[in-house]
Amino acid sequence: MNFIGLGIACIGMGLAALAEGWSVSKAMEGIGRNPSAAQDIRTTMIVGVALIETVAIYILVVAILMAFVVAA
């Protein structure tokens, strides 16, 4: 049962990575379409990527706890 939770955590990490890449891609697309708004888009993108990365770190902590603490 523990391995199912670890698998779900791995899927969550993968989805966080995909979301981060997608958000950066769309931000670069927006800068390409409207270069005058580059500073605003970049600032918003950095905040969004930081939030996505925080979720990924939380998932990693939960996976480590499941692997080493719950299993013991």
Image (tube, grey):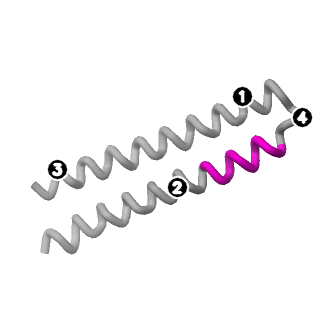
Residue for point 45% across, 61% down: 57
Residue 26 in percent (x, y) is at 65, 32
Earlier-in-chain disc, 3 versus 1: 3
User: How far separated are the C-alphas under marks 4 and 3?
Assistant: 48 Å
Q: Dot 2 corresponds to which residue? A: 53
Left or right: residue 52 compared with residue 11: right
User: How far separated are the C-alphas under marks 3 and 1?
Assistant: 37 Å
Left or right: residue 63 compared with residue 41: left
Q: What secondary structure is found at the residue carrying circle 2?
A: helix
User: How far separated are the C-alphas under marks 3 and 2?
Assistant: 23 Å
Do the CB atoms of the residues marked 4 and 3 lie less than 8 Å apart? no
Do the CB atoms of the residues marked 4 and 2 lie less than 8 Å apart? no
Q: Using a 10 Å C-alpha cutoff, classify the residue at mark 3 as few (fewer than 14 neighbours), some (14 to 19) or many (20 or more).
A: few
Q: Amino acid at mark 4?
A: Ser
Earlier-in-chain disc, 4 versus 2: 4
Point out which mark residue 36 bears: 4
Earlier-in-chain disc, 3 versus 2: 3
The segment highlighted magenta reads 39-48
Do the CB atoms of the residues marked 3 and 1 lie less than 8 Å apart? no
Q: Amino acid at mark 1?
A: Glu
Left or right: residue 2 compared with residue 61: left
Q: What secondary structure is found at the residue carrying circle 1?
A: helix
Earlier-in-chain disc, 4 versus 3: 3
User: Residue 25 magenta-drawn?
Assistant: no
Q: Dot 1 corresponds to which residue? A: 29
Q: Amino acid at mark 2?
A: Glu
Near-viewer residue (26 or 14)? 26
Point out which mark residue 48 bears: none
User: Residue 41 magenta-drawn?
Assistant: yes
Q: What secondary structure is found at the residue carrying circle 4?
A: helix
Residue for point 44% across, 55% down: 56
